[in-house]
Image: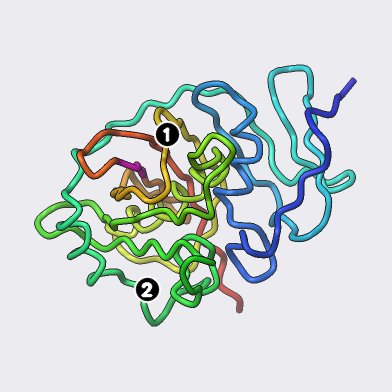
């Protein structure tokens, strides 16, 4: 029999990706935070905003985030094989932001993580652009103090959110496709992400096949210490007509 893992969870409108659904990484992180070590979470439908969702254990090592009888996302422990590139400096990442591809033509300008339509600190405003001479994208980031949890660092679901979008921008180095949405995020948090401290967020391409693309991402301290890493699978939406 399925059992509740915790009380109802709500994805607040602040944590949206598209205008009417949750940021994919944040939504996956609601499951990922319940798993010790690396976890892989798949999105099944757009995560609804501002209504209670229930987190269930299947009893087979998998967790499900449900909206009534609808499975919004599911996942559990996973192995994460990922070669993480060396971190650029904060200065290199700052220069790369000038090459962010979606300043004026962003598919989801209200995204909590990377939407240029969001003001700081309501949105994170992480805009990874290509690092000069390297096949990676990067952006500097100083988390706002309002994001701190009870232990003084960011909660896992917020870290998963940060890891989400750079996997897409990294895969875009293989060539821009149409609008894509996150299908699966596999992530591991290995260190504390602390508000007020400078960090570098990085993304890079892994591969593309048809409408599917994969990218990696990582969060580093300013000194290059790895704090979290992820691999994202993206699906290009079919064109109408």
Front position in the image: 140 or 180:
140
**Magenta stretch holds residue 132:** no
The answer to whether any part of residue 203 appears in the image is no
Q: Residues within 10 Å of mark 1 (few under 14, many from 20)?
A: some
Q: Position of residue 40 (x, y in %)?
A: 55, 32
* Disc 2 secondary structure class: loop
The residue drawn where x is 38% and y is 51% is 196
Taken as a whole, is the magenta stretch helix, strand or loop?
Answer: strand
Point out the stretch of residues depicted in magenta: 216-220
Residue underneath mark 2:
102
- Identify the residue at image location x=26%, y=66%: 97
Q: Is residue 231 above or below residue 176?
A: above
Foreground label between 1 and 2: 1
Residue that numbered label 1 is attached to: 192
Quarter of the image where one finds residue 127: bottom left
Along the viewing direction, whichever of 56 and 9 lies nearer the viewer: 9
Q: Residue at x 34, y 56 (%)?
A: 141
């Amino acid at each position: 029999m399925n059992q509740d893992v915790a009380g109802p969870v709500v994805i607040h409108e602040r944590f949206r990706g598209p205008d009417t659904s949750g940021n994919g990484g944040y939504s996956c992180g609601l499951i990922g935070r319940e798993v010790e070590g690396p976890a892989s979470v798949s999105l099944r439908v757009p995560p609804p905003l501002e209504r209670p969702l229930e987190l269930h254990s299947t009893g087979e090592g998998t967790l499900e985030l449900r909206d009534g009888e609808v499975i919004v996302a599911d996942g559990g422990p996973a192995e994460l094989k990922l070669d993480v590139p060396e971190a650029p400096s904060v200065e290199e990442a700052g220069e790369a932001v000038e090459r962010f591809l979606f300043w004026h033509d962003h598919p989801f300008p209200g995204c909590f993580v990377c939407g240029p339509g969001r003001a700081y600190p309501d949105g994170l405003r992480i805009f990874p652009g290509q690092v000069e001479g390297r096949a990676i994208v990067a952006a500097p980031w100083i988390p706002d103090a309002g994001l701190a949890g009870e232990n003084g660092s960011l909660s896992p679901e917020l870290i998963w959110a940060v890891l989400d979008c750079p996997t897409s921008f990294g895969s875009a180095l293989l060539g821009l496709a149409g609008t894509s949405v996150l299908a699966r995020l596999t992530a591991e948090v290995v260190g504390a992400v602390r508000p007020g401290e400078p960090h570098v967020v990085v993304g890079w391409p892994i591969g593309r096949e048809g409408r599917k693309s994969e990218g990696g991402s990582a969060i580093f301290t300013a000194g290059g210490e790895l704090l979290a890493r992820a691999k994202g699978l993206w699906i290009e939406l079919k064109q109408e007509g």
